[in-house]
Image (cartoon, grey):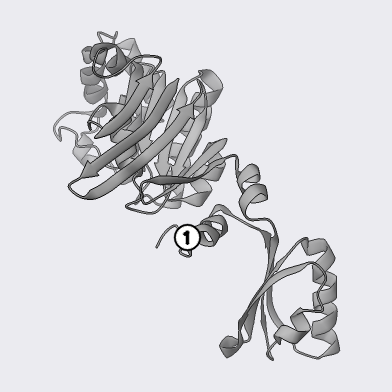
């Protein structure tokens, strides 16, 4: 569906996107994950035709923006971090307006009101909508023309957890009804994990990793995590007695630590036995598998939300 080859975008001496290659298949839900400034938005804007590449090539369904502008516009649906609406138009009037750009019948507005759960707000002015309702309206606008490709640029930034989940539910239902290709930029790890079957991690204009969550963790950052807080310090010498230990991060000031181990089920009993034998006093304990944030830290030395 989308083929990107040696794509670069420079602003003066700064390369926002640096010799990037990417291929996206029809029907894929792909997350572009990375911190602010990673190049996600610039990449999406070039796919949308809003930015012209400095060099390289973008093909969408074997067509380019230089030669097939009208055709590509009809294929895309776009929703940004924030969409400006006409304050004195109602929700239904706004959808009618955007539907008219594609010569769609008024019945399409009713379909979208149901799809984005805004039927109860159909007569409300857009200025009176909450942040979550505005984002659902923006998503409805993006879906009016039944796009083959939907591009969402951090659509849930600034939303509360409930409003974010409502957007996720709409996108999940969309996937069940039609084979839309989704490109989602986000710096929310759980959003990428929940919605997308493929994750592309970006930083400083380059792709650091590309694959499913399981593939990425297996390929780049194997292991599981045991985090703890004790009444007494846990020495590195004791940690070395734990089977399957990969790494021990010691924070003695607060008697806290983190063990990276091959398998929690193997290492945890030995760790608990050491705590009991040396009477170190367990205060807190958390066991978990690694996440995208752990993967990003291992690659860059900083967190996704830094």
Q: Which quadrant is the C terminus positioned in?
A: bottom left
In the picture provided, is 200 more to the left or to the right than 272?
left
Q: Give neighbour class at mark 1: few <14, some 14-19, many 20+ (Cα, 10 Å).
A: few
Foreground pick, 50 / 29: 50
Task: Name the secondary structure under disc 1.
Answer: helix
Foreground pick, 112 / 17: 17
Foreground pick, 76 / 164: 76
Where, by quadrant of the figure, is residue 289 drawn? Answer: bottom right
Q: What residue lies at 56% left-to-right and 59% top-to-bottom?
A: 294
Q: What residue lies at 20% left-to-right and 45% top-to-bottom?
A: 11
Foreground pick, 151 / 103: 151
Q: Which quadrant is the N terminus positioned in?
A: top left
Does the image show residue 40? yes
In the picture provided, is 283 more to the left or to the right than 264?
left
Q: What residue lies at 63% left-to-right and 55% top-to-bottom?
A: 221
In the picture provided, is 195 more to the left or to the right than 100?
right
Q: Is residue 128 above or below residue 238?
A: above
Instruction: Name the residue that disc number 1 marks.
Output: 300
Q: What residue lies at 32% left-to-right and 18% top-to-bottom?
A: 109
| Residue 264 x/y as whole percent | 77, 63
| Residue 22 x/y as whole percent | 45, 32
| Residue 218 x/y as whole percent | 67, 49
| Residue 224 x/y as whole percent | 70, 61
Does the image show residue 137? no
In the picture provided, is 26 more to the left or to the right than 214?
left
Q: Is residue 166 above or below residue 224?
A: above
Q: How many marks?
A: 1
Where, by quadrant of the figure, is residue 46 drawn? Answer: top left
Where, by quadrant of the figure, is residue 137 drawn? Answer: top left
């Amino acid at each position: 569906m989308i083929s990107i080859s040696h794509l670069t975008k420079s602003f003066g001496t700064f390369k926002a996107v640096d010799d990037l290659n990417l291929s996206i298949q029809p029907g894929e839900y792909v997350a572009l994950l990375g911190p602010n400034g990673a190049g996600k938005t610039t990449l999406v804007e070039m796919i949308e035709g809003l930015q012209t590449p400095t060099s390289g090539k973008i093909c969408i369904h074997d067509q380019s923006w230089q030669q097939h502008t009208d055709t590509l516009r009809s294929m895309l649906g776009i929703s940004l971090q924030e969409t400006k609406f006409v304050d004195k138009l109602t929700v239904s009037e706004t959808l009618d307006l955007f539907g008219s750009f594609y010569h769609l019948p008024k019945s399409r507005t009713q379909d979208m009101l149901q799809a984005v759960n805004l039927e109860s707000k159909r007569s409300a002015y857009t200025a009176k909508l909450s942040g979550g309702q505005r984002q659902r309206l923006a998503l409805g606008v993006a879906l009016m023309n039944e796009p083959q490709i939907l591009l969402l640029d951090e659509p849930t930034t600034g939303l509360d957890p409930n409003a974010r989940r409502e957007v996720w539910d709409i996108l999940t239902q969309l996937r069940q009804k039609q084979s839309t290709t989704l490109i989602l930029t986000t710096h929310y790890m759980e959003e990428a994990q929940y919605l997308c079957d493929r994750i592309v991690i970006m930083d400083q204009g380059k792709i650091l990793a590309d694959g499913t969550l399981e593939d990425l963790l297996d390929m780049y950052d194997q292991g599981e995590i045991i985090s703890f807080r004790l009444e007494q310090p846990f020495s590195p010498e004791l940690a070395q007695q734990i089977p399957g230990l990969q790494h021990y991060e010691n924070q003695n000031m607060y008697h806290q630590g983190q063990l990276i181990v091959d398998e929690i089920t193997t290492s945890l009993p030995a760790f608990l036995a050491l705590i009991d034998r040396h009477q170190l006093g367990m205060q807190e304990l958390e066991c978990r598998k690694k996440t995208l944030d752990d993967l990003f830290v291992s690659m860059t030395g900083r967190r996704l939300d830094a």
